[in-house]
Amino acid sequence: MARNIGIALALLALAVGSRIIYPMESLAIEVRADDLIPNTIFTNSMLVSLLVNVALITLAVVAAGNLKAVPSGWQNFMEWLIEWLYNLFKGINAEYAQRTFPVIATIFFLVILSNWFGLLPGVGSIGICHAAEQNETSMSEIRLAVSAPVDNILPPSPFAEGSKYIGCQAGEGIVPLFRSPSADLNFTLALALISVFYTLYLSISKLGAGYFGKFFNLNGVMSFVGILELISLLARIPAFTFRLFGNIFAGEVLLIVMIFLVPMVVPLPFYFFEVFVGFIQAFVFAVLTMAFIAIETQDHNEHH
Amino acid sequence: MEALGVNLPKLIYQIINFGIMAFVLYRLLYKPVFNMLQERATRIEQSLKEADQVKEQLANAKRDYDAEIAKARQEAAAILMQAQERVKAQELELINQAQQEAERIRTEARAQTEQERALMFRDAQQQIAEMVTLTAEKVLQAELKQSHNALIEQSLVDLAKSRNN
Amino acid sequence: MEVEGLRLIATALAIGLAAIGPGIGVGIIVSGALQAIGRNPEAQGTIVTNMFIGIAFAEALAIFGLVISFLIGFGII
């Protein structure tokens, strides 16, 4: 009992001490991914998505490069994961589970690794120095600038001399080297488009042109229902996009705000929460895609 | 959307990236793992079937073995019975032989005894005849002649015959 | 009032109001799912999967509000 109280007090002291010794001067979060190389489209989130690709391919080679009849280690884990995913999809729609597995499982793997990559230390905090005045006009608009609430009481941070970033000149900001692809709208929009258009492709290839009869028809109330169906289909794209983007980006903002308020101890449970959210978002993206495929490929004339 | 950082080339880059990853993962991960799972499933099924077969074979072998054992036991019992019968037969034969032997010995002994008795009887007859003759000679020396001897002997033989009968 | 102050109020209101409905919705969804699990514990896997799908739908509304609040807060709109 006394030991637990001691641990709690030590953690509290650590939290308070970290707040005094390492106060963050200001928050710097951007909604959009920064270009790493000027005048190209190569952004920091693209770099991370390449790293995610490398990690996934490495995992695939390690797990499935030398398949053995009696699995062990990574092979065992990946077999379990793939079987679990497959059974999950089969539970939603047995007809399309096998055929759509490569696409949906790739969505799952890419999203989950992207989500978790954003939680690694150094993502967002390691970057390239750049002079703030170069593109000050655009940057200052999209940076959320909050100054420390207790500026006057606290001693200045030891790292505050010159710049708030170690190794940068005074007044310089950084372009983060890494950024979770899930916190980049291009990635989430691309996945949303793939998910929706893949569903469309499957349903048209199954039901033919009759599929569009669900949206455009002239039999009374059903024509309004068709329009609503169309709207709900179109709304899926922003829903997918912003669900993933919003969750992951909000998670990053949450972590940064927590670190801004109390640099140590307090952010820890939020990290656990973000790991969970990262998994849940990947799971939801994959399962929702499968569920929409299951719904859209049903022949409506048969059921009504 | 531009303010949020969405632009077409980056979007297309992500779509292509996804396509490449889906293809690569399909070739490197999903296909081999699915093949492996399927192979394993068939192998398990096969080994289960084989195990069933082996079990059946074992049951057959057990049944055959049991039958063999039963047959052998029956045969053994039959052989034992035969042997017992043969032994009994032999015993009977031996007893018969022994009885016959004993009978033969007895008969022989009886015959011998008979013979000896006859011999003795004849001896005795002769001796008696001689004694009678001698006595009669002496008695009849005076009155009877030697020729009466034959008559006496004849009468003795008749006597013996009447006794034998 | 300054534009900056209005922006802060708008940011807070956007996410604050957007969180009300989904909060209630998620509560109802989880309550229903837990009752279903209590009634039929064997179906736990399916129920939890569907519960997360439902939560994702409800949560998406809050996330839209959050995105809007970010857009206001970051000065994009």
Image: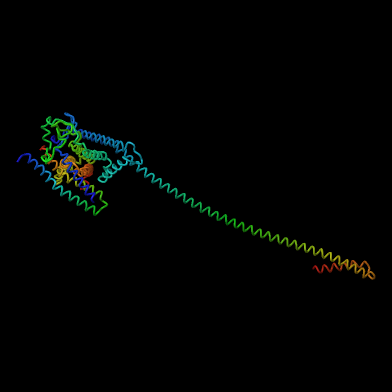
Q: Colour mode?
A: rainbow
**Residue A150, horizontal then vertical, whole percent:** 11, 41
Corner quadrant of residue A77: top left
Q: Is residue A181 above or below residue B58?
A: above
Q: Position of residue A55 (x, y in %)?
A: 26, 36
Percent from the top left, x then y, of residue A271? 21, 42
Residue closer to the observer: C43 or A232: C43
> Is C38 situated left or right of C69 in this image?
right
Q: Position of residue A279 (x, y in %)?
A: 23, 43
Extreme-left residue of the structure:
C1
Residue C15: name its quadrant. Answer: top left
Residue plotted at (26% across, 39% down): A102
Q: Is residue A10 left or right of residue B42?
A: left
One can see residue A242 in this view: no
A3 and B26: which one is in front?
A3
Image quadrant assignment for residue A120: top left
| Nearest to the observer: residue B159 or residue A148 | A148
- Residue sitting farthest toward the right: B142
Number of marks in the image? Answer: 0
Q: Inspect this view and state whether residue A36 appears.
A: yes
Name the residue rendered at 66%, 58% in the picture: B94
The extreme top residue here reads A39
